[in-house]
Amino acid sequence: MNLFGGILNGLGELWAHKLRSALTICCVLLGVASMVVTTGFMDGLFAVWGQSLEEQGGPEKITGSPSAVEERQEPFAQLSRGFRFDDVRLIRRLVPEARYIAPEIEGNPRINHGRKRGLVRTQGVTNDSFVINRYEVAQGRAFNDLDLLDRASVIILGSEIRKRFFDETENPIGQFIDLDNKPFRVIGVMRAYERFYGKYNVLNWKNDIAFIPVTTMAAKVQRSDRLSYLNVKAGDITALPDTIDALENVFRHQHRGIVDYKAKTNEQALASYTQTKSAFVIGGGAIAGVSLLVSGIGIMNLMLASINERVREIGIRKALGATPANIFSQFVTEAVTLSLVGGVFGVLAASGLIKGLQAVLPPGNAPLLSPTAFVVGFGFSVVAGVVAGVYPAIQAAKLDPIDALRYE
């Protein structure tokens, strides 16, 4: 019997034993649907995590920041001037692997606008900071080179800061606000960042912040050129080790051998991401294995029952010249057909469930419709059919034609 004939025979058996077939199909359906939905949730979770990592600068980002000196260096700590603009100039000259260099100074000055006032996290930044941290201005403009050279009193507001100090219908662009009693002109408003993990917006830190030129922050607000952070982005991930070594050489020279700094990369976060994803993949594989076992048991029971009812048919086929291989392939094909029908319904059910969850859950919490999950789901149903159909098919192929014809 050819493949097409085996499929037709399998569909005929499904129709002939509707209730039993429906129960078996339900086993396969639940197994495939659970695997596809679980994979969708995993894809959604890791998409959020991966995008959050990119929003923080990606794995190529290196952050230099002040650190407490070791006890043995404490008597000499004053030899180091800490992170300064001189470090930035030397890095630009000596570290060609550093594609973007962003000195930053952070503070919490008081902002006043009309009757509204409060302390606001404010960062002095450069244009490279916007590139490294993927900051986007939704309204107005970003800083230009002239703002940095002139130490201009201009400010860009995060979306939450804009809501705190301006009415919804009010256009903040061009208006002045006081920052530590110094007037600053609003030139831009950042876009609102949303990436939910549960009820928590993991990117809200980008909304609740204000930006001014780093030169302005040093000259007019902090009155010091001591940097809070020094962010560097390597050209690509392969250049990261060389970039870190070069940066540490610059820091060691500039800080006169005093280790009052630390260099942190997003590579550690990327490693954690990779390890956790691997663990989830293993867990998903275990779920698929259990589903495969349950579905396989259902298919095997149906096939064994079908063989018991078709002993005389098998005997007739063998008497007419069918070989054990023909009988074996016939029953394996029927088992695969049964599992594929369940797989189709399982994928359709999973698609509907995922669409429904996407409609009611926040974007960061909803599962994703993954083509990979659908392919794996169909593959899962084929494997379930083959594995579950082998034993019954062997039993059918081993039947003696004379005994089969005598079977009552």
Image: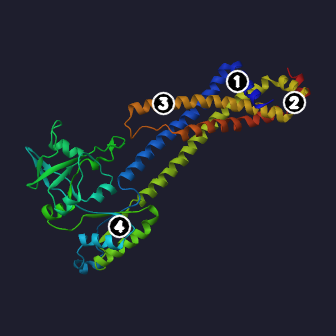
Report the residue marked by disc 2.
322
Amino acid type, mark 1: Leu
Dot placed on the residue nearer the N-terminal end, 3 or 1: 1
Q: Give the mark nearer the N terminus: 2 vs 4.
A: 4
For label 3, the residue is 353
Query: Type of residue at label 3?
Result: Leu
In the image, 217: left or right of 16? left
- Do the residues under discs 1 and 4 have CB atoms within 8 angstroms? no
Q: Indicate the amino acid at tag 2.
A: Ala
Say which label, 1 or 4, has the lower sequence index.
1
Position of residue 227 in the picture relative to residue 180 (left or right): right
User: Callout 4, which amino acid?
Assistant: Ala
Please rate how many residues cluster around mark 2, counting C-alpha atoms within 10 Å: few if below 14, some from 14 to 19, many from 20: some
Quarter of the image where the C terminus is located: top right
What is the C-alpha distance between the residues marked 2 and 4?
74 Å
Q: CA distance from mark 1 to mark 4?
A: 65 Å
Most extreme residue toward the front is 146
Marks 3 and 2, the one that precedes in the sequence: 2
Which numbered disc flags the more N-terminal residue, 1 or 2?
1
Alpha carbons under labels 1 and 2: distance apart: 21 Å
Name the one closer to the observer, 299 or 372.
372
Marks 4/3: CA–CA distance = 45 Å
Residue, disc 4: 263
Q: Quadrant of residue 12?
A: top right
Q: Residue at x 47, y 40 (%)?
A: 41
Residue pointed to by mark 1: 11
Q: Say which quarter of the image contains residue 101.
A: bottom left
Tell me which residue sits at (44%, 56%) in the image: 270
- Counting labels gives 4
